[in-house]
Every structure is written in structure tokens, then in C-alpha cells.
Amino acid sequence: GREQKDPSENPGKDVDDPNTGDENPDKDVDDDKDPSDGKDVDKDPDEEGKTPSETEERVSEAMLMYKEALANGYEGSYLQFLDEYKEIISARLENSAVDQAMLSVVSIFSTFTFSYGDAAAGGAGVIYSLDTTTYDAYILTNFHVIYSADSISKYSKRIDVWLFGSENEREALSATLVGGEMDKDIAVLKIKGSDTVIESDGKQHTNMDILKKSAARAIKIGDSDEISVGDKVYAIGNPAGYGTSVTSGVVSVAAEYKQMPALDVTQEQLYNYQYYGYSIRMINILAMRVDAAINHGNSGGGLFNANGEYVGTVNAREEASGIVAFGYAIPSNLTVAVADNIIANDKNMAAHADFGFTVKSEKSRSVYVDGAARIYETVTVASVNASSSSQGKLNVGDEFVSYKIDDGEDIPIIHLYQLEIVSYLLREGDSFSVTVIRDGKEVEVSFGTLTEKDFKINENSKIN
């Protein structure tokens, strides 16, 4: 019944903040050795010159906390400290991970031209990569952050980016659109370190000037397939255009398809659809559902797990009357696959593999794996285009078992969305095959070495 206090706290004494470095709370501290035996535990002579792993950095942080506790009168061993204060240690490491994640999130303001003049809209993004020599960077965001169907220009004519803690005009970064995939609501921006930003008073600075003095860092990418219902997540974005901030919640649904109006639908068309029953183009976007507060301006920002790893891009919320705490984020495995595809493609768009077949989830079942409840699906062939490369290779009703790229391992197909993601992972020159069950027997189906004809580009993502 007593309140557990952090023994490292001492309001009468200043201590250095140990919360630096990367953590991974899913990995345990080595219980075989007690660093409190007086030996130097901070350095391993066999590891000199090597980059520390997340586990090593996590242990290092816990050791710093233990040393603070000793300085404030704690008398137990290191292992006793870990056992007695595990909840506080875990919370502090988690807070540190989220703090670091904030340094990977940016605020974005996109300027569009309308019939009445120019107007800016706020959104967010994450630093996908950062070259600390040239200070060039790629930013991952939503397509709708830089595109407006109602504007004359359609695409943003100017994109301003601000780092966390530097949200004023003199700290603005200029960005350009690399490309995007409209129907996946994913876009990639580029910040060129040498580009110059002209401020309203005529003064100038380069993107490098701002990035070089900042603590900005690229995201740590997590595996969204490892997300399970109930996992704690943090949404970091630019709500209402007020600057970078954090909300937290849990995962409500690990993966589902959310139907919504296509991004090239205008407000007038949407109104006619809602009130007069006119038809509009609809799309289905893969998303995880969370109960963290999502507001306008969060779009494009990151969804992070308790380790500070990026697991999705926030893109929508449910706004129907009577529904609350329905926020959506595109899983990181899809956003990363699409982003890498866009960056690798010189056409400013994603080129995804298209073999001319569609799939469906025949049935699903719940399983309990590695301490988490998950849903596995039975994925089958729904249709085969008569003139496609799948004709004569796949049959309607074939049940997918696995897929393989080149000479890699066979990846089990247990989710409907996996084949969507792999279509963006493939490149010309790759070999691709799937294993299916047909008439009770496993059959390997090879699509051979992929050529340009095996890929499709969505023309609605074309930048004019």
C-alpha cells in the first residue's frame, strides 16, 4: 500500500540525466552477473570500437540509474535494485524512448493555391533517413498532407518543415516532394542540406544550418507485424498545427482495411455523395486502429511503440457521430515498403508488382503465440485475369502457404495484407514464387525473373 519512490530522486542534489541512448524493454538484463561486485562494468575490452546494441544501451541506462541510487543512499546490489524498482525503471526507460522518438517527428505546413489565393495546411511527418555528412534527409508523411483535390495546384507549391522544439520561422526547413502513392496515402519528401531558406525579413539560412545544430535523428523502424491488441502506443504529430506533441493509447485492432473516399475526391463530390447518393471513387487502406487521441494535424506523424520504434504513420480518425477513440495508422511494414519503392523509382511514383490475381480471406482463427493473441487468416486466390502472368499458374481457390523472393527463405502467408506489402518490396530482376495448396497437395508456382511488364504504376499518383 505504500507509494514506491524512485531512489534516484534527490531534490537537494543535481544529477546528470541518464536517459540517453536507445532502449529495448522487451529484452532482459543479463541475470548471470551482478555488476555491483566492484568491477568495471561500463566497458568490455572485447567490445571496444563496436556500436552498442539496444540491449547494451538499456543495461547502461539501468546502471546509471543504479549509480544515482547508490549516491542517494541505496545499499542493495544491482540485481536487488532491478527487482525492487523494476516498474519505475521500465517507466523511465519507456519515457526516454518516447523522448527520442519525438526527435524523429517533424511538423509540416503545405501551401496550396486556391481560387481565392494561397492557404497553408498543417500536418506532420517522420525523418525516414538523415545523412549526417550532407544533411540530406527523407521525410515520410501522408499523401493528403501534400495534396488537395480542391486546390488549383493539387500538389503543394511550397512545403515547410520544422523540427521538434524549433517551430519558428528562423528554423524552417524547405522540402520538396519526391513522390507518393495516392491510394495508400503515403508520400516521401526530401530535405536537401544545401538548400537555402529565405525568411520574411530577407535573411537566409540553409537546411544544414538548422539540422547540424539540432538533435534530430532518423526513426528506429519497428515490425508492425509484431504489434498485438493491447500494446501501448504513442501518436506524435502536429495536432491543429500547434506544434509537435504526444498522445498515448493502446492498439484496438492490429490490422484491418478501412474504406474511405479516394484522395482525389473533391469536397463538392463528397457532399453530393453524402447527401444525394452520387457515386465517388472509394479506396481500402490497410490500417491499425488505436484509441490514442488523433486530431487534424496528426496526419503523417508517427505511431511508436513503448520502445520508441516507429510502427505506423497516423492518417485518419473516425468522425461519425457517436464514435470516439477510433484513430488509424498505416502499419510501418507497408509504409516502409512503399517509401523504399518510391525512392528507388525515378518516376516519382511507386511501381508495384501486379501478377493479375486477386486474393481473399477464406477464413480466420485466433492463436496465442509468444504471449500475444493474434489472428491468422487462410488466404486464397479470388480471381485470375485471363491475360495475366498468373493465367495457367494459379487457380481460383488455391490456398497460399508461403512466398519467396530470390533465394530467400519461405515466408508463411498468414495475413491477407502480406501480398499487398510484398508487391511493393519486389523489383525488376527479382525472382518470385509462391507455394499453394491445390487439391490437397502443395504446389510451387514460379513467376520467374521479373521484368518491367510485371509492374504497374498508379497514374493518379503522377506529379504534374
Image: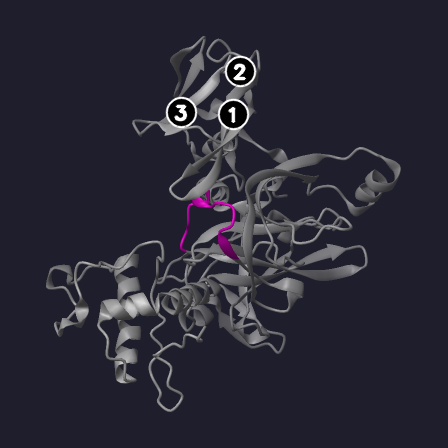
User: Which quadrant is the C terminus positioned in?
Assistant: top right
| Residue labelled with disc 3 | 402
Left/right of residue 57 with respect to residue 443 in the rendered view = left
Upstream in the sequence, badge 2 or badge 3? 2
Query: Could you say where residue 240 lies in the image, as x and y percent from the top left?
Result: 67, 64
Q: Residues within 10 Å of mark 1 (few under 14, many from 20)?
A: some
Extreme residue in the right direction? 276
Left/right of residue 252 with respect to residue 419 in the rendered view = right
Q: Main secondary structure of the magenta part?
A: loop
Above/below status of 77 relative to 444: below
Where, by quadrant of the figure, is residue 57 drawn?
A: bottom left
Assign a secondary structure to mark 2.
Answer: loop
Picture residue at 77% right of the left edge, 44% below the top: 266
Numbered range of the magenta stretch: 220-233
Where, by quadrant of the figure, is residue 14 drawn?
A: bottom left
Mark 2 vs mark 3, CA separation in Å: 21 Å
The one of 461 and 396 positioned closer to us in this rendering: 396
Picture residue at 74% right of the left edge, 41% below the top: 265
Extreme residue in the bottom direction? 12
Left/right of residue 55 with respect to residue 208 in the rendered view = left
Cβ–Cβ under 8 Å for marks 2 and 1 = yes
Amino acid at the residue labelled 2: Ser
| Residue labelled with disc 2 | 388
Upstream in the sequence, badge 2 or badge 1? 1
Amino acid at the residue labelled 1: Asp
Picture residue at 83% right of the left edge, 41% below the top: 274
| Residue labelled with disc 1 | 354
Above/below status of 89 relative to 313: below
Left/right of residue 400 with respect to residue 328 in the rendered view = left
User: Which quadrant is the N terminus positioned in?
Assistant: bottom left
